[in-house]
Amino acid sequence: MAVYVDAAIWKWVGHRWCHLLADDTDELHRFAAQLALKRSSYQGPPKTSAPHYDITGFERDRAVRLGAVECSREEIVAVFRRVRVRNFKRRQPQPVKQEARQDEPVSRWAAGS
């Protein structure tokens, strides 16, 4: 199992941010705990398609010292896709409402009365 970080290039609230991902969600949470990240900062399904944490550049440096693999943009996108496919449950399509049968009465509203 591995944990991955990309470059801290995203500016927000006075910091530069990046993504922390792992091959396994449990591994991701264990590693995040080592970084003292709040569990409430976790982002995953159903809100996002891939389980991850957004971390600051400072947290990224600590993550690398703890063994996180540094990834290029292309590599982190590949990790996002791999993790998403394995973990994300897509919404099931809703059944189509059936048309009224010929022998069922039509309401006055539906009939235009």
Image (tube, rainbow, N blue to C red):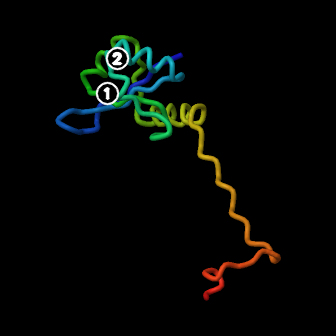
Q: Left of 66 or right of it: where is 59?
A: left
At label 1, counting other C-alpha atoms closer than 10 Å, the crowd grade (few under 14, some 14-19, many 20 or more) is many
Residue under pointer 1:
55
Q: Residue at x 42, y 27 (%)?
A: 71
Q: Secondary structure at mark 2?
A: helix
Numbered disc in front, either 2 or 1:
1
Vertical order, 81 against 109 (above or below): above
The type of residue carrying mark 2 is: Ala
Q: Left of 88 or right of it: where is 59?
A: left
The type of residue carrying mark 1 is: Ile
Residue under pointer 2:
63
Q: Secondary structure at mark 1?
A: strand
Q: Residue at x 78, y 74 (%)?
A: 104
Residue 62: x and y in percent read 30, 15
At label 2, counting other C-alpha atoms closer than 10 Å, the crowd grade (few under 14, some 14-19, many 20 or more) is many
Residue 112, image quadrant: bottom right
Q: Are marks 2 and 1 in contact (CB under 8 Å)?
A: yes
Q: Left of 59 or right of it: where is 98?
A: right
Q: Nearer the viewer, residue 40 or 15?
A: 40
Q: Left of 85 or right of it: where is 105?
A: right
Residue 73: x and y in percent read 41, 36
Residue 96 bears which disc, if any? none
Q: Residue at x 31, y 15 (%)?
A: 36
Disc 2 or 1, which lies upstream in sequence? 1
Residue lying furthest right:
103
Q: Quadrant of the C terminus?
A: bottom right
Q: Nearer the viewer, residue 91 or 5?
A: 91
Residue 5, image quadrant: top left
Vertical order, 73 against 64 (above or below): below
